[in-house]
Amino acid sequence: MDLSLLCVHAHPDDESIWTGGTLARYADEGARTAVVTCTWAEGTNRAGELERALDLLGAGKPRLLGYADAGKPESAPGRPRFVDVPLDEAVGLLVEHIRSVRPDVVLTFDGYGSSGHADHVHVHRVTMAAVEAAGYDQLYPEAGDPWRPRALYLSTLPRSVVESQWESVFGAPPAPGQTLPGVPDDQITTHLDVSPWAERKWAAMHAHESEVGRGASMTMLTALPEQARAQLLSNEWYRRVAYTGPQERTLS
């Protein structure tokens, strides 16, 4: 397959939870796939877990920006929190990866960070700027030859799925006025059935051993009824929000 995908995420495990099925599917179909992770540094336990997860998903070696997780200074000792880094600095580092990978398609979080996490929201902002900047030879000339991806997809959830599964995941219905992740169903442009890769996605999630059992996403998914868990693992949803290249590429 003549296609290259680059996923940009905040933390180790995001790649498996949000785009694991997409990565595994397209790797199996012969696409080049890669992942940039904006927090945690080389040599930390979670960087090692990320390497094992990416191997399962066929997505190459970790590409770490090496900044600190907003709530975990031990994630990158001596480095600033990702959310505190000047936008221009973070964009420049990501531009370098975009120009190195030269992806047809870039995938990242939606404007709410897919879950509302501050690091996720910042990844969205940085990626939106970097995808555009990577195509200009006037910007970040030290980061390599310009490259303009052909499509940008934002990982998200249909609001109907969020509402139907909320009580199963959190043990209670949403509180009145509570802010929910996801977008109205009619804003979903791309739905991928990744059920043939759900088992591998689940294995990649469990490669992040430090996150299992501490109340993280894997723990909540494990507690779900089998049918509800299968729905979330077997489906991935996106909004295609930008066409930036000379010939559009689409996921299908």
Image (cartoon, grey):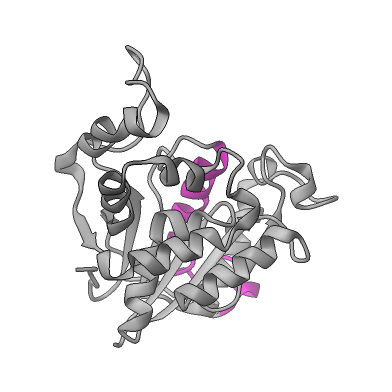
Residue 137 appears in view: no
Residue reaching furthest to the top: 176
Between 40 and 172, the one nearer to me in the picture: 172
Is 120 in the magenta?
Answer: yes
Is 89 in the magenta?
Answer: no
Q: Quadrant of the N terminus?
A: bottom left
Q: What span is in magenta?
A: 118-144
Left or right of 1 in this view: 99: right
Q: Main secondary structure of the magenta part?
A: helix
Identity of the residue drawn at 29% across and 53% down: 230
Identity of the residue drawn at 60% across and 49% down: 211
| Figure disc tally | 0
Image spot of residue 186 (x, y percent): 14, 41
Image spot of residue 226 (x, y percent): 30, 48
Residue reaching furthest to the left: 186
Corner quadrant of residue 214: top right
Image spot of residue 71 (x, y percent): 69, 37
Measured along the vertical axis of the image, is residue 52 above or below residue 168? below
Between 108 and 217, the one nearer to me in the picture: 217
Identity of the residue drawn at 34% across and 52% down: 154
Left or right of 157 in this view: 125: right
Measured along the vertical axis of the image, is residue 54 above or below residue 228? below
Left or right of 171 in this view: 77: right
Image spot of residue 32 (x, y percent): 41, 82
Between 175 and 218, the one nearer to me in the picture: 218
Corner quadrant of residue 83: top right
Residue 210 appears in view: yes
Q: Quadrant of the C terminus?
A: bottom left
